[in-house]
Amino acid sequence: MNARFHKLRIWKITVVILLILGLPGVSVSSAEEISSYTIGTGSRAYQYEELLGLYQYSSPAYLKSSVTYQIEALNATLAAESYNSVNREYAEIVVKLSELEGVKGTLQAYAAGITDATALAEINAELMNIDVQINQYSKSISTAQFSLAETKLQEEMAVFYNTYQHMLITNAQTSLKNEFLKKCYGLMLIKEQQDYYQAYQSYLSLVRTVQVIKYQRGLIGRVDLDLAEANLMKNDVTILKNQSNYDKSLSIIIKETNLGSDFNFRFQLPAERKDYKQEELQATFLINNVTLKQLSNYINSYINYQNNNTTKSQALTKQIDLKIQDYSLQENELRNNIKAYAKDAITAYENAFRTYEMARSEIKLKGKQLEIVVAKKAYKKATELELRQAVYEKEAAEVTLYQSYYDIIVWQNILDNHIYGATP
């Protein structure tokens, strides 16, 4: 648990004690407009944008995303070179075959005017030799035509990575930045969840104490006492798991940004609602989806392969038809899925704002309820158990509020950057 967690928890416990004692000048605050959230106690404060810059500079995964598609682009260049090589071989065979056909025609014309049997026999022998070579080159040209068509298909499919290299890299890095955003703002959410679990633990601890007394006095059975014990232990395990998640997430962020130890994070919490037009957003998602472009490339490549003059078997022709049909169906399905996703993402974003407004109202309500319990406790008209319950219920409302902040921020990033398939 980092130092700020300890200080914040000690502060909260102190406030509760002061409230219980009924000391003057102590009150429970209602929900306020929150513009930022701080994690850590170091002297160097980092805004999210600064962390993102460090992530882009230091993260191996982020840097690798660029290299990966540069390699793919080079593979496309190699595919083009392979096609050019096969095309040269094919052209050489065509030229050689043409030359042989020319020589054959010349010899046949020459033989028609010869009456000498010996000379005619030599010419016929030469013609037979040429026919053998023509037959060999005819078979070679058929094989070369097939190889040329295959390498052309591979080249057209691979050129996609060259044409859309920048878009592929941008999309991959945008997705990685979205994941980094989730990790950073996820720390805030885990922290608030931990505060709730700690407050709930305090309540459960007192419940167990009360149940022990009741059990000793014969007012409840062993099952009721065991249930109180089980609830306390279960929440304790949740606290440990949540702390482990926090430590792991923070460690990953530090590693991916190459930070030291003297820092704190100050994340902005914008709550200004954006108005997204469904049809416009769907169109933009479609335009920016690189998988759609790849499927279109596959379809066009196989159509060109289908329409070339290469002789194909019935099975191969059927296979090409099915591939074109399959890629076309995939393309249509993906279009529909993208449009549905964009629509659902807008709804999720709007629902996050509704939850935000609801949570703010609930925090105000829980704050007032806590004030009432504190006042009653001062006059011994409310129990310690009621006070602890009021505290953890207010913490629960705060978790809902920060969950809505998190959802708003992530969904807005997804919608602004058109990241198909992403979720908070």
Image (cartoon, rainbow, N blue to C red):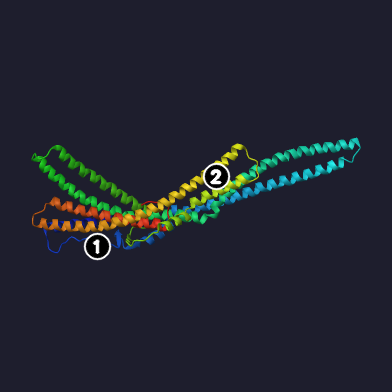
The nearer-to-camera label among 2 and 1 is 2
Mark 2 / mark 1, whichever is N-terminal:
1
Q: Residue at x 27, y 52 (%)?
A: 193
Residue 85, given in percent of the width and then of the height, sits at: 65, 48
Q: Residue furthest right?
A: 116
Residue type of the residue flagged with mark 2: Ile
The crowd level at tag 1 (other Cα within 10 Å; few <14, some 14-19, many 20+) is few
Q: Residue at x 35, y 62 (%)?
A: 46
Dot label at residue 287: none
Q: Residue furthest front?
A: 279
Q: In whole angstroms, how far apart are the C-alphas of marks 2 and 1?
A: 58 Å
Secondary-structure class at tag 2: helix
Residue denoted by label 1: 32
The reply, left or right, for residue 254 in relation to residue 148 is left
Query: Which quadrant of the structure image shows residue 110?
Result: top right
Q: Visible in this render: residue 403?
A: yes
Residue type of the residue flagged with mark 1: Glu
Q: Residue at x 21, y 55 (%)?
A: 394
Residue denoted by label 2: 324
Question: Who is closer to the viewer here, 136 or 293?
Answer: 293
Residue 19, given in percent of the width and then of the height, sits at: 14, 58
